[in-house]
Image (cartoon, rainbow, N blue to C red):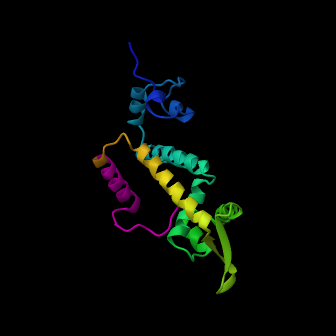
C-alpha cells in the first residue's frame, strides 16, 4: 500500500515531536493524511494554538534576522503609531508586564533604536521614543513580516483568507465590533 507524501515534504519545516506525539506515532514521517485525521479529533483551542505557534515562530525568526525579536518589533510599531506614551502605558497597551517591557526597551535602546526621555510632567516617568534608525528598522521589519504572513496563507484562496480573518476577529472580540486597546499581542 503506497503512503501519502510525508507531512514534512508538504508543509515547510519538519514535523515536531509534539505533532508526532499528538498523533500517537513515533514515526517522524507521519503522513499528511494521518496528521489530518488526528487534527479532526483535536479541539479548537489546540488548532488555534498550533496555528498561532507556527506563525509566531516564523515571524520571530524573521524579526531576529533583522536583529530584533517580535516583541521588539511590537514595541517599535506601537511607538511609530503613537509617540508620547509612558513606558507603563506602552506596557499596558501591548499586554507586556513591566519587567518584560523594561528588558525589551533596554535592548532597543542599546541598539540605538529607542531613547527614553524623562516626562516633563513627572521626571520619574520615562517616555520611550523612536530614533530615526528605529523608525527605519520598524518599517523594514513590518514589510518582512507582512511577506511572512502572505507566505503563511499562500495556499488559501483570497476569499477564504478574508473569511478566516473575519471569523478570527469575531472570535477574538466576541462580536462586539470593538477592538480593545490593550491585551497581549503575543
Side of 84 where 105 appears, left or right: right
Query: Is residue 24 one of those drawn in magenta?
Result: no
Give me the residue at 49% from left, 52% from top. Answer: 145
Spot occupied by residue 113 in the image (x, y as percentages of width and height): 64, 64
The answer to whether residue 87 is above or below residue 53 is below
Give me the residue at 50% from left, 51% from top. Answer: 144
Give me the residue at 52% from left, 30% from top. Answer: 20
Q: Nearer the viewer, residue 84 or 167?
A: 84
Q: Residue furthest bottom?
A: 121
Quarter of the image where the N terminus is located: top left
* Magenta part of the chain: 160-186
Residue 165 seen in this snapshot = yes
Residue 96 seen in this snapshot = no
Give me the residue at 45% from left, 33% from top. Answer: 11
Q: Nearer the viewer, residue 129 or 162?
A: 129
The answer to whether residue 64 is above or below residue 81 is above
Amino acid at each position: 500500500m503506497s503512503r501519502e507524501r510525508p507531512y514534512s515534504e508538504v508543509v515547510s519545516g519538519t514535523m515536531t515531536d509534539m505533532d508526532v506525539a499528538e498523533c500517537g506515532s513515533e514515526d517522524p514521517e507521519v503522513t499528511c493524511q494521518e496528521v489530518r485525521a488526528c487534527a479532526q479529533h483535536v479541539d479548537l483551542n489546540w488548532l488555534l494554538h498550533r496555528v498561532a505557534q507556527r506563525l509566531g515562530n516564523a515571524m520571530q525568526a524573521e524579526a531576529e534576522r533583522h536583529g530584533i525579536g517580535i516583541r521588539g518589533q511590537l514595541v517599535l510599531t506601537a511607538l511609530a503609531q503613537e509617540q508620547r506614551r509612558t513606558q507603563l502605558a506602552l506596557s499596558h497597551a501591548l499586554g507586556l508586564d513591566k519587567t518584560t517591557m523594561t528588558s525589551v526597551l533596554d535592548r532597543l535602546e542599546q541598539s540605538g533604536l529607542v531613547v527614553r526621555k524623562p516626562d516633563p510632567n513627572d521626571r520619574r516617568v520615562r517616555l520611550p521614543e523612536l530614533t530615526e534608525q528605529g523608525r527605519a528598522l520598524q518599517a523594514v521589519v513590518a514589510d518582512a513580516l507582512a511577506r511572512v504572513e502572505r507566505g503563511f496563507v499562500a495556499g488559501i484562496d483570497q476569499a477564504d483568507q478574508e473569511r478566516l480573518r473575519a471569523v478570527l476577529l469575531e472570535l477574538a472580540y466576541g462580536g462586539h465590533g470593538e477592538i480593545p486597546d490593550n491585551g497581549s499581542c503575543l
